[in-house]
Amino acid sequence: MCINKQYLTLLLPFIFSTAVLAAEHKEDTLVVGSFSSGVLDNWEVKDFKGKTKYELVDVDGVKVLKAHSHNGASGLFNEQRIDLHKTPVMHWSWHIENKLGPLNEQDTSGDDYAARVYVLVSGGAAFWQNKALNYVWSSSSPVGKVWPNAYTFGGANGHMTMISVKDSSHKTGTWYSEKRNILEDLKQHFGEEIPFIDGVAVMSDSDDSKSQVIAYYGDIYFSKD
């Protein structure tokens, strides 16, 4: 497997800065996905249709999370209540080995994404009030496009909203670092201030397109800014 050497210049400083922040400013930083430490505590697989294989692997001496989907659709979830007034900004890094599509992502036949990271807001007993923001590596939608998940109903402010963060113009085999203010995004897309989220998930799926994809995820953490 050929890994772009830009990995070391992007991910290692990211991991180092995460460790420093966590050690020096614990009240301002919350690490939810410490993959570089070789830890998957509190992460649980949830199957939807078929299975995506998730495992920790070494890439150039750094542990990352690898996802391999072959006609599968399962996610890796970390159920954890996070106070967005304290740590509203989510950080992560990712890259994909191959692209999907182009797919019609607004239709159930094309509801596959090479990589996605999403946040969950539980509706409790009123499960129909569950909300999710999906930050996706899109095969056909340009960066910045927003749409409701194909398996849900309603407009762009539906309960499961998709946001294109990377698209087909971005290179495979190259690491990208991302940062999103979740508190602001939730207010923008659901029309209300939501102070807490109840979990974070990653997912690479290819069941609807009956294809396969390989993606990698670096550490995921929340910070004050």
Image (spheres, rainbow, N blue to C red):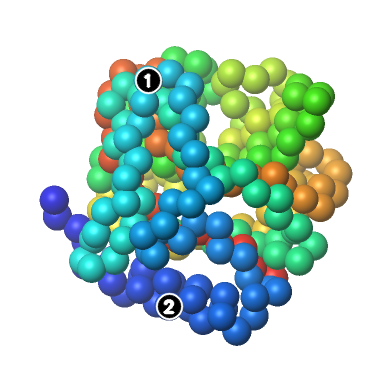
Question: Helix, strand, or loop for circle 2?
Answer: helix
| Mark 2, other Cα within 10 Å: few <14 / some 14–19 / many ≥20 | few
- Could you tell me which residue is drawn at 44 percent across and 29 percent down? 74
Q: What residue lies at 42% left-to-right and 72% top-to-bottom? A: 15
Q: Position of residue 90 (x, y in %)?
A: 60, 59
Q: Amino acid at mark 1?
A: Gly
Instruction: Check residue 109 in the rendering and tell me which mark sits there, or answer none.
Output: none
Q: Could you say which disc has been placed on residue 50 in the image?
A: 1
Above/below status of 42 relative to 128: below
What's the residue type where badge 2 is placed?
Answer: Phe
Dividing the picture into quadrants, the one containing residue 206 is top left
Q: Is residue 86 or residue 175 the one in the foreground? A: 86
Residue 27 pos. (x, y %) = 70, 74
Q: Is 46 positioned to the left or the right of 29 in the image? A: left
Q: Is residue 5 above or below residue 200?
A: below
Residue 188 in sight from this viewpoint: yes
Q: Earlier in the sequence, mark 1 or mark 2?
A: 2
Q: Which residue, as the protein is rendered here, is positioned at the far left?
A: 1
The residue shown at (49%, 30%) is: 46
State the residue at coordinates (23%, 61%): 59
Q: Can you say which quadrant of the picture contains the C terminus?
A: bottom right
Residue 30 at x, y percent in the picture: 62, 65
Q: Looking at this view, is 201 or 171 the one in front?
A: 201
Q: Which residue is mark 2?
A: 16
